[in-house]
Image (cartoon, coloured by chain):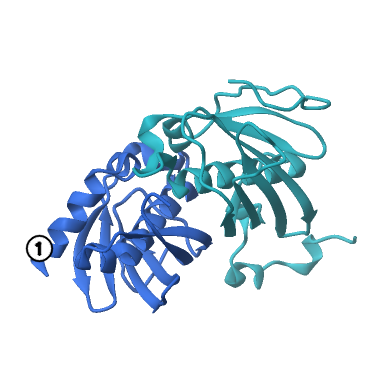
Chain colours: A blue, B cyan
Amino acid sequence: MEDLLGQLNEWLKTIPYTQKLGVVVHGLNEDGVSCHMPFQDKFIGNSQLPALHGGSTASFLETAAIVAANRQSIETGSSQIALPVSMTTSYLRSATAHDLFAQARVVKQGRRLVQVYCEAFQLAPNKPVATLQASLMLSDQGE
Amino acid sequence: MQFPQPIKELASLGDPMNSPPFGREIGFTLFGFNDLEVCTGLAWDESLVGNNQNQSVHGGVITTLMDQTFGAAVFRKLNTGKAVATVELRIDYMRPATPKLDIFCRAHCYRMTRRIAFVRGEVFQDDPEKPIAHGAGSFMINANDTVPMTFQNKIDPSTLGGA
């Protein structure tokens, strides 16, 4: 389990955009992962409030969903990679200038598709700021 | 970087660099707008890559571009300077983005009610007829000055005036 966590973080470090965001995987559970994105000034979308940009929250949620969907492939050393097909992001509250945390859960792991549900929160885990529902397609690398 | 299509009746842009920190972070550019749509884009950059196999940009970059452009479409149509907040954004990724090509977005606010605006749009690269992603979103308008219910109850009806 510890090893897999390291593997997932190593994998995230190879992806330029997730490295730019500074997303880390900090926990694993049976059907999902939890992720953390420490606050950076550049994530702001509204300087007056201030509030995070909807795009930075969505980018984080999407990354968490991709990690959750690819976890099995990475764990088993499979060549399959899960790529996003459709995603819906719901914004529940304005996200403040703080760290973001996410809990991503694989709702269904199929042979071709993976469905993931993801919730992002900040200071209070029971007050999510955004949710994401994603469908990802499994395809062989290089396809 | 040049928008791959002529933008008709290009209105005065004001200050195009007036984009928020995260917009600047990904290189968001506002090209123009007319009554029908808002046209934006961002220059391809290695730091936006989300898939090392095919070097295509991360889905989050496309989401950010759409969120910003869709919001601008509502803001523009609303024309009151009031804040706009995203309620929900749905995106279909139709094909991977081609590496090293700039990315553009067109958005159209097709319905506006008193509180909610509806927007749809596409993200494409060199060919506007071959979008790489399609999106639809709903936005809350005048998001910042919604009066909470408890205060609304205390408003003196005589101050509201006739319609």
Tell me the residue at 72%/56% (across/down). Answer: B118
Residue found at x 64% / y 51%: B134
Q: Is residue B154 visible?
A: yes
Q: Position of residue B162 (x, y in %)?
A: 89, 61
Q: Is residue A50 left or right of residue B52?
A: right
Tell me if residue A53 can be seen.
no
Between B151 and A24, the residue placed more toward the observer is: A24
Task: Assign the N terminus of chain B to one quadrant of the image.
Answer: top right
In this rendering, is residue A104 above or below B8? below
Question: Residue B18 in the image: x percent, y percent?
Answer: 55, 27
Task: Tell me the quarter of the picture where residue A4 sits.
Answer: bottom left
Q: Residue furthest left?
A: A2
Q: Position of residue A86 (x, y in %)?
A: 54, 61
Which residue appears at 51% of the width and 46% of the height? B96
The chain to which mark 1 is attached is A
Residue placed most toward the observer, B112 or B34: B34
Look at the image and tell me in which quarter the C terminus of chain B lies: bottom right
Tell which of A121 and B42 is nearer to you: B42
Q: Position of residue A137 (x, y in %)?
A: 46, 64
Q: How many marks?
A: 1
Q: Considering the numbered disc 1 on the image, is that residue within a helix, a strand or a loop?
A: helix
Which residue is identified by label 1?
A3
Q: Is residue B55 left or right of residue B40?
A: left
Residue B129 in the image: above or below residue A81: above
Q: Amino acid at mark 1?
A: Asp
At 85% from the left and 60% from the top, the residue drawn is: B161
